[in-house]
Image: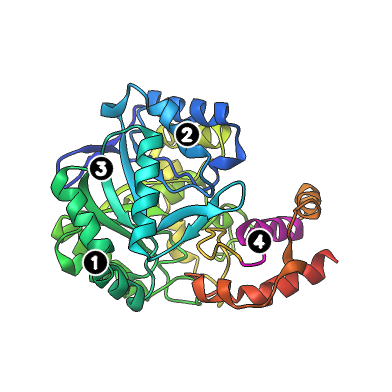
Amino acid sequence: MGAMEYRTVPRGGERVSVIGLGMGSIHASTDDEIARTVERALNAGVNFFDLCPSEFRPFRAYGRAFAGRRDDVIVQMHFGAVYETGPERKYGWTLDADRIARAFEEEMEVLGIGYADFGMVHCIDEERDFDQVMSGGTWDYLQRLKATGTLRHLGASTHDPRIARLFLETGLVDLIMFSVNPAYDCTQGSYGIGTAAARAALYRDCEQAGVAISVMKAFAGGQLLDDARSPLGRALTRAQLMQYALDRPGALCVLPGVRGLADLEEALAFLDASPAERDWSEAASLAPANSAPACVYCNHCLPCPAGIDVGLVNKYYDLARAGDDLARDHYAHLGRNAADCLSCGHCDARCPFGVAQGDRMREIAAYFA
């Protein structure tokens, strides 16, 4: 395997691996495989870890893998992700400062890492939510943690360039986690959030201000890897998409989500990719069709009042339509599925990509029926 590549945090000087580890799907593995995956990543030179799983259990496995290796680890923790729902303690989202503080304190205890490198205000995609963070106690809490050394840097995650700019203009954030890929960065269609010009200007302004970008959604939830689902009309490779993200001004690292060792090895193959294999220039000629907003399985809409794993239901639907019979079987064995939708509108309001999930649930239920 090729040597890991590193970039420097402009405000702080830490050296960060260009490949980090996303955590959204890692719960699909056993605790032992999660720990082995993290250990393999560390041994391959990965040192940047996004700590926002879909359920609480993986925190403990990460804590095992981090034991004795704190100096090898740089983490971004999410303030607003909470784990209070059901026996699996599923991911949920809140702006309540007290719940945020309780979640962070428990996560830090389980991880056993002593301090967090980056404290990220989690998934802020509306101005009213930004205002609530700034006035409702969360931002003050993060600043107190930084003053005591519990946080080394402040940051934020968002899918919207307008909100990213609001955080940038505070002058206090050192890192923004942002969704970056060639489909989102195009102006045609409604697939991305914000115009191409607004997104490009954000990248440039982050670089000029010394604010780094950690990249999420580089593969658009896997859609850009699949000819049948790609809004570009053709699949691109992991190497092309990772290089595209890393070529944006201000980009520090890309965070592909992994389910276990096999996914990790696919991400690490980037290090062996030739310049020709990383070349993403063909994406410039692939304008996305005027597509409707698409679910990328991020689960920012959870918790669902009906107990539906909305992202997973969408994923099984997309895979089944592409001919995956196993996905059809997996859907059939879900405890709650699209037919259980209450049409309450909760997921519609929370979707950062504007997907009408209520309509989508009816479509999915009809398809599998």
CA gap, disc 1 and disc 3 = 18 Å
Which of the marked residues, 3 or 4, is nearer the chain's N terminus? Answer: 3
Where does the N terminus fall, quadrant-wise?
top left
Query: Is residue 268 a member of the stretch shown in magenta?
Result: no
| Snapshot quadrant of residue 259 | top right
Name the secondary structure under disc 4.
Answer: loop
User: Is 1 in front, or is 367?
Assistant: 367
Where does the C terminus fall, quadrant-wise?
bottom right
Chain part drawn in magenta: 305-321
Amino acid carrying label 1: it is: Phe
Q: Position of residue 238 (x, y in %)?
A: 49, 46
Which of the marked residues, 1 or 3, is nearer the chain's N terminus? Answer: 3
What residue is disc 2 on? 60
What residue is disc 4 on? 307
Which of the marked residues, 3 or 2, is nearer the chain's N terminus? Answer: 2
Amino acid carrying label 2: it is: Arg
Name the secondary structure under disc 1.
Answer: helix
